[in-house]
Amino acid sequence: MLAQITAHPTHAPRPRRRSPATLARRSAVLLLLFLCIPLVATLALHPAPAAARNPSVLDGLALAQRGVSANLCALTFDDGPGQTTEALLNILRDKGIRATFFVVGSRVHLYPETLKRLVAEGNEVGNHTFSHISLRQRAPVEQLSEIARTNEELARLGIVPRYLRPPYGRYDNATIDAAAALSMTIALWSVDSRDWRKHDLSAVLPRKSYGVRGVRGVFLFHDNHRETVEALPNLIDRLTEAGCTFVTMSEYVETSGPLCLH
Ligand SMILES: [Zn+2]
């Protein structure tokens, strides 16, 4: 190619004079690119999870989009019931708010009275599998069993959970099918307190990253950490000051109807 160009210098491209219409078109394209680049970058950094397109999964994105009309805050506690659950219930009662507990089925028979109290005080119970396994890539029949056995344990106490929270947030299509077969919806979270790792709740305190719409969302905690229990009263006060309206998981989903995915 280099030899050809050298041999035929007259074929070298000459600068062209552009018409005003062409320049206007190019300006419009450049402006469009300028406007689109931030959007493309945002999508690249925060790709919509596949689950967001599935009507039976409420993942962080779907949950964050809900509650747009109010600062709805749903506190959720995983991995109980346990020795600290009663203390958590005392705090919720004293603060006059309700929360949702995603319980492990194998622990239900150990704390029947705690669960009865939990429901009697207006809190909600969700399913967190029977033995707290990662459901993803497990055989469909095993996944169904993990969820159904927990429902059976809860049914003995008259409790019918509407939401499934897969441990570690891990699930696949078989999980979605199993939940749907049991008339349940998979519900993850939008704000992770990371209480199991950092042993404090600073990750959910009001901060700039919540943006102008303020504090809201489905908050993930674990009710088997003493540090969580100790920090919770202050955290609830901070969230209340920030404008939180505390609701259960069902209330959170039902109250924020406009973005309903069903
Ligand atoms: Zn868990």
Image (cartoon, grey):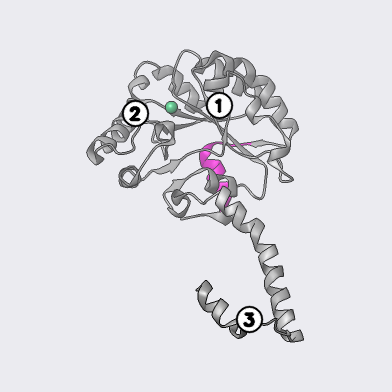
Indicate left or right for 30 with 87 as reference: right
Relative image position of residue 220 (x, y in whole percent): 54, 31
Q: Is mark 2 within 8 Å of ligand 1?
A: no
Circle 3: residue type: Pro
Instruction: Answer whether labels 3 and 1 touch (C-beta < 8 Å).
Output: no
Work out whether mark 1 precedes mark 2 in sequence or the reverse, and give the earlier one: 2
User: Which residue corresponds to mark 3?
Assistant: 13
Q: For ligand 1, give the image quadrant.
A: top left
Give the label on residue 133, or none. 2
The reply to whether residue 96 is in sight is no
Question: In this picture, is 244 found above or below 4?
Answer: above
Circle 2: residue type: Ile
Work out whether mark 3 precedes mark 1 in sequence or the reverse, and give the earlier one: 3
| Front residue of 148 and 231 | 231
Q: Please say whether residue 81 is one of the residues in the magenta stretch.
A: no
**Which residue is at 58% across, 15% downward?**
227
Residue that extends furthest to the front in the rendered view of this protein: 7
**Which residue is at 67% across, 26% downward?**
236
Q: Please say whether residue 250 is one of the residues in the magenta stretch.
A: yes
| Front residue of 240 and 8 | 8
- Dot 3 lies on which element? loop
| Front residue of 158 and 79 | 79
User: Which residue corresponds to mark 1?
Assistant: 194
Nearer the observer, disc 3 or disc 1?
3
Q: CA distance from mark 1 to mark 2?
A: 19 Å
Highlighted range, magenta: 246-257
Circle 1: residue type: Arg
